């Protein structure tokens, strides 16, 4: 008898075409993971629960929450979905497959780790470019409308930015030609990561408390509340790119001041 996961996968590839799974399937998985992980931060802001873990004392209004959700639905349907449909032939050409057997877990883990490292590198430079004066004013300022971020603001951006920084997410899979299962897992983990760093909350169980190289919500929240010319902290996931290129000095200085303030 096949393992349960492979049995489920066999059902999918038997009842749906690879095109359907790679496009509509990917879209549905993205939407499910994104909204299910992003809505809790809206609930926390409105209810006041866990307020002691909120990074900023300010909260967004119900109208701001609604504006974000409605704009996201429009962007996802009008930008994300068409891009997924159009890009399928390219991914197929680069080696995307959906057949059994599923890849070994060592292959999955090594590929996803590679994707995270490469995505962070590409995103860092793309994000720095978006913080140049003209591009910030005409493109990236949309994302920074929310100086107090919450989970769903992670994908609230100008359509041009969605395409521009989206390249960082797909370049790894495009280079390796992964199994569709690996691609889905990578997509889910990347969504969970970006929602977490935009959550506006730093909990005792936040990943940055356990993984030193992981930026997390505090690291990225600083980026949103500081003037765009001085914000720094451009990386998506890790902290070493900002450290290497000196774009985290303001944040590090603030953290030292906070520690010294607690000691007095």
Image: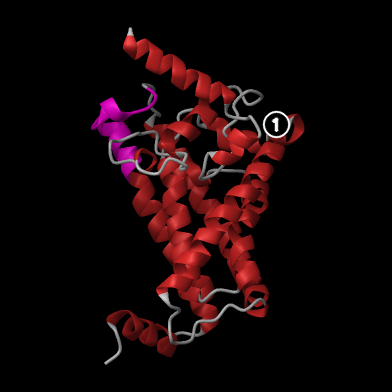
Figure check: 65 above or below 228: below
Q: Where is residue 22 in the image (x, y as percent from the top left)?
A: 52, 74
- Regarding residue 176, the answer to whether it shows in the image is yes
- Residue that badge 1 annotates: 137
Q: Where is residue 243 in the image (x, y as percent from the top left)?
A: 58, 34
Q: Where is residue 83 in the image (x, y as percent from the top left)?
A: 62, 64
- Looking at the rendering, the stretch of residues picked out in magenta corresponds to 40-56
In the image, is residue 248 part of the stretch drawn in magenta? no
In the displayed structure image, the side of residue 147 where residue 150 appears, left or right = left
Per the image, is 55 magenta? yes
**Residue occupying the far top of the picture:** 264
In the depicted view, which residue is nearer to us: 251 or 134?
251
**In the picture shown, does residue 193 fall above or below 218?**
below
Estimate how packed mark 1 is, as few (under 14), some (14 to 19) or many (20 or more) residues with alpha carbons within 10 Å: few
**What secondary structure is found at the residue carrying circle 1?**
helix
In this rendered view, identify the residue nearer to me: 1 or 29.
Answer: 1
Outermost residue, right side = 134
Task: State whether residue 222 is above or below residue 103.
Answer: above
Left or right placement of residue 83 versus residue 61 in this view: right
Report the magenta stretch's main SS: helix
Task: Name the residue rendered at 40%, 39% in the picture.
Answer: 199
Rendered image quadrant of residue 92 = bottom right
x then y, percent, for residue 74: 53, 52
Front in this rendered view, residue 197 or 158: 197
| Residue 104, quarter of picture | bottom left
| Quadrant housing residue 44 | top left
Whether residue 27 is visible: no
> In the rendered image, which quarter contains the C terminus?
top left
Q: How is the image coloured?
A: secondary structure
Where does the N terminus fall, quadrant-wise? bottom left
């Amino acid at each position: 008898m096949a393992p349960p996961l492979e049995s489920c996968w066999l059902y999918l590839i038997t009842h749906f075409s690879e095109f359907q799974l790679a496009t509509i399937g990917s879209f549905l998985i993205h939407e499910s993971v994104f909204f299910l992980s992003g809505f809790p931060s809206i609930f926390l802001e409105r209810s006041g629960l866990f307020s002691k873990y909120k990074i900023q004392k300010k909260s967004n209004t119900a109208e701001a929450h609604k504006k974000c959700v409605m704009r996201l639905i429009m962007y996802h349907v009008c930008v994300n979905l068409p891009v997924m449909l159009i890009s399928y032939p390219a991914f197929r050409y680069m080696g995307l497959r959906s057949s059994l057997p599923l890849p070994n877990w060592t292959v999955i883990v090594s590929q996803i780790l590679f994707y995270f490292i490469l995505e962070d590198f590409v995103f860092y430079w793309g994000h720095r470019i978006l913080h140049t004066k003209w591009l910030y004013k005409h493109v990236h300022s949309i994302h920074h409308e929310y100086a107090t971020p919450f989970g769903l603001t992670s994908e609230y951006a100008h359509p041009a930015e969605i395409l521009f920084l989206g390249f960082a997410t797909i370049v790894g899979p495009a280079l390796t030609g992964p199994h569709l299962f690996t691609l889905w897992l990578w997509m889910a983990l990347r969504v969970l990561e970006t929602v977490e760093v935009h959550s506006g909350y730093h909990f005792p169980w936040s990943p940055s408390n356990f993984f030193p190289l992981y930026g997390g919500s505090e690291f990225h929240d600083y980026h949103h509340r500081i003037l765009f010319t001085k914000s720094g902290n451009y990386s998506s996931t890790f902290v070493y790119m900002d450290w290497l290129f000196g774009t985290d000095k303001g944040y590090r200085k603030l953290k030292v001041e906070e520690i010294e303030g607690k000691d007095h």
